[in-house]
Image: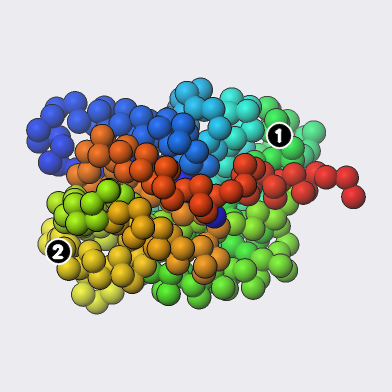
Amino acid sequence: MEFALFSLGHVPHHLTDADPDAEHHRLMDEIHVVQEADRLGFKYAWVSEHHFLHEYSHLSDSGPFLGYLAATTERIHIGSGIFHVTPRVNHPARIAERVAMLDHLSGGRFEFGTGRGSSSVEHGGFGIEDSNETRAMYDEVMPQFAAMWRRDEYSFAGRYFSMPPRRIVPRPWKKPHPPMWVAAANPATFEKAARMGLGVLCFTSGSPRELAPLIETYKKHIVHAEPVGDFVNDNVTCVSTLVCREDASEAVEMVTRNGQMYHQSLAFRYLDTFPKGPDVPVWPQLVPELGAEQVRAAVADGAMCVGDPDVVRTVVRGFADMGCDQLGFALLAGRLPTDVATASLQLFAKEVLREFDTDPVHRSDRMRSAAVAPR
């Protein structure tokens, strides 16, 4: 199993209350953490794209951010987690150009994560009145990217976007094109992703026990994929919390003070297309922060990588055993200081990472290489 980071650009009010330049500092901190992860042997860094979601995520134009990471890292793959591919947010030809350019600038290390967005605040800001319509937009657009990169002259006349004959340049450097992924949060999307031959960025939180049926659905259908790209990217990424310390009790205490439930409250506020339970409070009411016993229960259930290396190793094993291909951590989605987040990464890399990730080649690279290998 491989490991990843997620950069969100979370800028909560407690940061801006104390520092008028908090937004800038948080973006620089996100870069620092990815650079450290690159040095430590993490395989992937995913960068979000959100619009108008104050506090929740200030990473809106992720293209320059990804380009900067490409220039300041060496081995880690950098990915869009995600690019909005609905035409009213990003014209598909511009997305195709951006993906190809990032593939060149990163030396073939770019991963093309896609999605249709999950917030009416975002959709409405770009004139999409019905969030449900983004499903049809996504289905129309996704098969077009490989066609844009493949054809000498590309044109399209669809329901949601059209363009006259044009040659899309540059072409991706590493053939046939970067691995393609989609954000998913429910069983139907997992099955759809598999049938489209896309890797899954699973943004559903939970224990391996809760996530296992989703992965099982994906792995069942991926063998029958009809890929929208030029190869199948058989890959599932899950997300968990990581606080790895020599003292397990200290790690638990840090989570109780991390404020990550405030980030969760913002997610419930903005991401209104995600399913919510009946007990979720309505903004401005907040999800209560976790107490120590709740954190320990989540760790025991396998949902949080929180504790000393032995405890974290056990939790990671649960994700690996259920078929998770990649496990990611959003280290700065709360109050965790950057130096503490970095120390946690370092201890995890030293004591846990290499026990699970023994392959020097990225799994997505293996998928891509198999597609161009002589038959």
Q: Residues within 10 Å of mark 1 (few under 14, many from 20)?
A: some
Residue 283: numbered disc: none
Q: Is residue 244 left or right of residue 285?
A: right
Residue 328: x, y in percent?
43, 51
| Disc 1 residue type (three-letter) | Lys
Which residue: 12% across, 41% down? 14
Q: Residue most toward the top?
A: 71
Front residue of 3 and 96: 3
Residue beneath disc 1? 174
Residue 196: x, y in percent?
65, 60
Residue beneath disc 2? 291
Front residue of 78 and 278: 78
- Quadrant containing the N terminus in the rendered view: bottom right
Tally the numbered discs: 2
- Is disc 2 placed on a helix, strand or loop? loop
Q: Is residue 57 left or right of residue 99?
A: left
Q: Earlier in the sequence, mark 1 or mark 2?
A: 1
Residue 39: x, y in percent?
46, 31
Q: Is residue 133 left or right of residue 227?
A: left
Q: Residue most toward the right?
A: 375
